[in-house]
Structures are given as structure tokens and as C-alpha cells.
Image: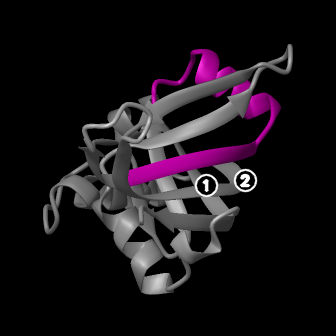
Amino acid sequence: MRRKELQIRDKKDLEAVLQNATICRLGLVDEKHHAYIIPLNYGYEEGRLYFHSAPSGKKIKLLRRNQIVCFEIDINHAIVNTGIPCHWSSQYRSIIGYGTVRFIENLEEKKKALQVLVNHYAAGSSYEFPEEELRRVTVFSLLIDRMTGKRSA
């Protein structure tokens, strides 16, 4: 990171970004080595991000081919208009991280992962997940290998 004074180093501050953001942008690489970025709803717990998806599509195809991914999460966005062109700025807190995706096939494990995801948006909610729905939905986790946080000046 070029501006070390902006780095978020405290684990609690990093966790706050993970807990308070609503979208995770997942970076993948396609078969032609082109970047593919997709915004996703997610849940976070104990060093893992959890996602759900339809069982097919470009994202799933790419993840089955290569489980190494990059992700970006940000919160507290605001544009700072200084009144001087080329001197505008932004306020934010963000994380860029790397990790490995694992597809979750076990139905009990899927339930737990989906509950983490639901709790991210509706804390304290408890839902039943019918077996036929669990069999239909694709659920995967991302084990965070490393991440770096940054805040605006």
C-alpha cells in the first residue's frame, strides 16, 4: 500500500467493514485471462465469506475452474467536492482481500452458511430452509487468506 498512514491495521476495524458492508465484489479470471468482477450479497463469520447462487452461470463456471479469488468490500462512501477541479476526493473504508472458494455440498453445512448470510442483512432472524431448496441452491464459502484495509484521509 502506497500510503501506509491510511491502512486499517486493527482487526476490529477490519471486522467492522466486513460486518457493515452490504455488497462484496468478487474478482475472478475467465478462460482468456480476462478479469470478471461480480457484486454479490454475502455473509461473514470467523474469517469466511458466504455466498449463494443459482447452480449455473458464468460465475459458477469460472469458480469451478479456478477457486482462487480476489474480493473488495467498501462502506461509508462520500464524494468530497473541494470546488477545485482535479482536487475532489472520496471518503470511504475498504478492504481488498484474497482467498480460496469452496463449494458447500452438505445440506446441514449449507443451512448454517445460509443462516450466516441471512443474519448479515436481518440480524437475529431464523429461517427454515426446505430440503428441496437446499438441494437447488449453490452455496460457497471464501476462506480469507489475506486482506488489507484502507480508509480515506
| Residue 70 left/right relative to 38 | right
- Residue bounds of the magenta highlight: 53-74
Q: How is the image coloured?
A: one colour
Residue 37 marker:
none
Which amino acid type is marked by label 2? Thr
Residue 41 at x, y percent in the picture: 36, 41
Q: Which quadrant does the N terminus fall into? A: bottom right
Residue at position x 53%, y 24% from top?
55
- Dot 2: element: strand
Q: Amino acid at mark 1?
A: Leu
Q: Are marks 2 and 1 in contact (CB under 8 Å)?
A: yes
Res. 2 visible in picture: yes
Q: Residue at x 65, y 23 (%)?
A: 36
Let me know if residue 68 is in the magenta part: yes
Question: Horizontal and vertical percent for residue 140?
Answer: 56, 46
Which residue is label 2 attached to? Answer: 100
What residue would you read off at disc 1?
Answer: 142
Residue farthest toward the front in the current orientation of the protein: 84
* Quarter placement of the C terminus: bottom left
